[in-house]
Image (tube, helix red, strand yellow):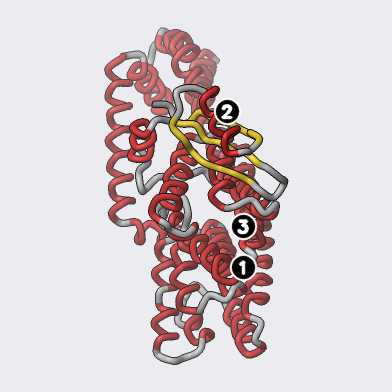
Amino acid sequence: MPKFHVLAKKTPKDLYEETIDASNREEVLQHIARLGYVPVKITLTETAQEQVASLLAVHLDASVPAGVMESFMRQFASLTRSQIPILQALRVLEEQSSDKTLKAILGKMKASIQNDGKSLSESMRLFPNAFPLDQVNLIYAGETGGGIQEILDQLANKLEREQALKAKLQGAVIYPLFVGGVGILTVVFLILFVLPKILKTLKGLGGRLPLPTQILMFITEATSHLSFWVIFFLVIIAVTTTVMTLFKNQRQAFDRFFLKIPVVGDLIQSLEWVRFCRSFGMLLNHGVLILQALDAAIPVVGNQQIRAELTRIPAVVKEGRTLTEGFKAVPAASPYLIQSVNVGETGGRMSEVLKEVADYYEKEAEKKMQVFSALLEPCMILGVGLMVGFIVMAVLMPIFEVSVAIK
């Protein structure tokens, strides 16, 4: 039998909400009338079997794009600020969500709250990839201390700033890569369609061709065969698979290597400190204990090497030493960061200081992105220029030799 979700009221404050089984909408209206309520909204929902199937389809490792999550947090905060109950707010967000993964997750959360009696933070904890531990702990702090809409707003702002920083990073990389990609496609076009005719003419001049011309002729002849491209793509697939497997198994070693690359390593460190300090500061600001805040904020860091170094801080704090001493045990922590933590610890304003540190590193990251973009673009242009220069040299050298021989 179909299920209908009913929202009705007698007065602005006397609301009635229920999911009932009925043959059709008319039967639902009659049921509401018998109770003395006026219908506001009647929605046909999934059958029990369909609902269970959709909930089981949600994988616990499901993740949601940051942009979608930021919009969800913003709307969730707006609904709770309007005094709409959590369960009803989740239902509204589920109905209007265009992201299938988020819709399924919200359905599972709603079911765990309604059927299992879980809290909002407990239902979020079921999906660690969609709701990281720092977010769950902040929601829990809001549940116990009140002001959950304020926390949702802060989480939305945090996600928005992360998205803006990510967009700037993509913008710094996309144009140089576009220039390099167009240059490489141009070279490929020359090799496949232009050079074969030119090299055929040069070969007809007779005599021994210069080494660059011979190399170019070999490349042109090889790329004219289908077997070359089959082998080429098989090698690319094999190399990519090998690198991805090594990266997965030796992630920390790769991350350690990236940190040693000039400019890139500094940029990575700045981005990671923005994430960590902002999350750590928010958790402390809402009354989360230091060790709990550290356990929640450290997984936010993406670089495995820096994350491994940060795990030394809880060990130092557990020994009864200060947070400043814990940061001193982290090789990646700069003197500025350590001194700032010391000021915040002695002055009792740690959360404020961490926010200031996050803002500082965010500005530093933006500056480093500009430097990175300024360096990457000429490198790409230089690489394409060298390839084109080699082609020009290989084509012109036989012509020059013939001209000298004629004279």
- Decide: marks 2, 3 in contact (CB < 8 A)? no
Q: Amino acid at mark 1?
A: Gly
**Of the numbered discs in the image, which one, if any, rests on residue 29?**
2
- Res. 41 image quadrant: top right
- Res. 56 image quadrant: top left
Report how far apart the C-alphas of labels 2 and 1 lie in the structure.
38 Å
Q: Amino acid at mark 2?
A: Leu
**Of the numbered discs in the image, which one, if any, rests on residue 187?**
none
Question: What quarter of the picture does the C terminus occupy?
Answer: top right
Reading the image, the residue beneath label 3 is 152
The image position of residue 160, as x and y in percent, is 64, 51
Taking the image as drawn, is residue 373 in sight?
no
Secondary structure state at the residue bearing disc 1: loop
Question: Would you say 82 lies left or right of 266 here?
Answer: right
Q: Amino acid at mark 3?
A: Leu
Q: Give the crowd class for mark 3: few <14, some 14-19, many >=20 residues within 10 Å.
A: many
Residue lying at 50% horizontally and 73% vertically, measured from the top left: 293
Please name whichever residue, 183 or 307, is drawn nearer the observer in this view of the structure: 307
Residue lying at 51% horizontally and 17% vertically, measured from the top left: 399
Report how far apart the C-alphas of labels 3 and 1 lie in the structure.
12 Å
Secondary structure state at the residue bearing disc 2: helix
Q: Earlier in the sequence, mark 3 or mark 1?
A: 1
Taking the image as drawn, is residue 144 in sight?
yes
**Of the numbered discs in the image, which one, if any, rests on residue 146?**
1
